[in-house]
DNA sequence: TATATTTATATCGTTCACGATGCAAATATA
DNA sequence: TATATTTGCATCGTGAACGATATAAATATA
């Protein structure tokens, strides 16, 4: 007899992992139309909020490592979405700036948040319950963010 | 001025994506000790529940495609955790069976669910609130599972 | 029964994630 | 100021994810 703790249906992580993949898949056709992947879209969200950031700031904002972000940015640079230029004050930094194409993508993607948002709404996930869900996910993220650093 | 809908802090998907990655990272040192990755651990959970399943059943259970699962299973086969043998009734199927090593891993990993579970518990995520979180994630998954099929 | 379709799995190419490592610029310390 | 340390970024290798495509076996249809 399988123990309760090993049952797939009792795993929080499997649910998060699956839900994350499913929403990313929901973004896929909408972003793919404009030659973007979901992680690239996240980079755009960061740069639309604040343009001209060093790689490290972008990575920190997305809670990713630079070894994930650097190749991502290079691909986006190759697509003409952004530029990467050596920092003037600090020559180690690479400052990432949106091109006109990168800025213009915001208008083109204006319907995306709504479209994905509407597919997620259901019985238990409503404008009333989403803040509670956000709180739980934020708490998990903050808890583990610190924990993974100290125990690895 | 950036619109609310494009703010990173308003994105459900980014939270799910990050929370998923963070929990996977929490599993990493515990599983790595036994030469396992998190997706491989998921395969073990499936096979511990029911051994000797065709590739397709495992993939369906994990909501993954066979082109993700096949290489994963091959790596696990190379590690001696499981065997893959042609089905007798249906020669198209590959039946996946645990080896003794694969079965024995359950005892070795006995403390893992507890260890990870305890790192996740926090103010808003408690034994009382987890069922509600499960319900929301399950609803999102089910909603998108169907939606991604019909609209892609 | 011959042919078409479906099903189960595998192969290939691209893009993440991420640990490990390397390197040059900046900063701290001797 | 010379040396050590830290910081910012990049490179490399491995293992997922996943779209597209291929192939063989099973099933349905003509």
Image (tube, coloured by chain):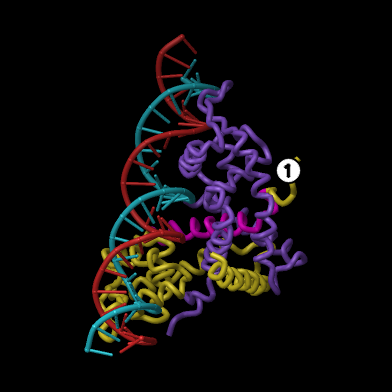
Chain colours: A yellow, B purple, C red, D cyan
Question: At x 64% / y 74%, what residue is drawn?
Answer: A135
Q: Position of residue A65 (x, y in %)?
A: 42, 67
Residue ID for mark 1: A2
Binning the other alpha carbons within 10 Å of mark 1 as few (below 14), some (14 to 19) or many (20 upward) gives: few
Using the image, name the chain to which the residue with label 1 belongs.
Answer: A
**Magenta segment main secondary structure:** helix
Residue B120 appears in the rendering = yes
Q: Is residue C3 above or below residue A6?
A: above
Label 1: which secondary element = loop
Seen in the image, is B104 located left or right of residue B36? right
Residue A97 shows in the view: no
Q: Taking D22 as reference, is B133 left or right?
A: right
Magenta span of residues: A8-32
Q: Position of residue A41 (x, y in %)?
A: 41, 67
Q: Position of residue A139 (x, y in %)?
A: 63, 73
Q: Nearer the viewer, residue B83 or A106?
A: B83
Q: Residue at x 51, y 36 (%)?
A: B77
Which of C24/A101 is in front? C24
Residue B88: which quarter of the image?
top right
Residue A76 as seen in the image, left or right of residue B101 = left
Q: Quadrant of the N terminus of chain B?
A: bottom left
Q: Where is residue A14 shown, x and y percent of the image?
A: 61, 54
Q: Is residue A27 magenta?
A: yes
* Residue A42 occupies quadrant: bottom left
Q: Is residue B33 magenta?
A: no
Identify the residue at horizontal 58%, vertical 61% (top origin).
B26
């Amino acid at each position: 007899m399988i123990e309760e703790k090993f049952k797939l249906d009792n795993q929080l992580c499997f649910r998060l992992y699956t839900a994350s993949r499913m929403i990313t898949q929901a973004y896929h056709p909408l972003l793919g139309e404009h030659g973007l992947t979901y992680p690239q879209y996240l980079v755009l969200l960061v740069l639309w909020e604040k343009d001209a950031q060093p790689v490290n700031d972008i990575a920190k904002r997305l809670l990713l490592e630079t070894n994930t972000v650097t190749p991502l940015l290079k691909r986006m640079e190759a697509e003409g979405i952004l530029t990467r230029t050596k920092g003037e004050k600090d020559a180690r930094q690479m400052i990432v700036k949106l091109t006109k194409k990168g800025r213009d993508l915001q208008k083109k993607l204006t319907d995306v948040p709504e479209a994905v948002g509407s597919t997620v709404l259901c019985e238990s996930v409503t404008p009333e319950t989403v803040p509670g869900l956000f709180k739980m996910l934020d708490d998990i993220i903050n808890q583990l963010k610190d924990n993974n650093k100290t125990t690895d």
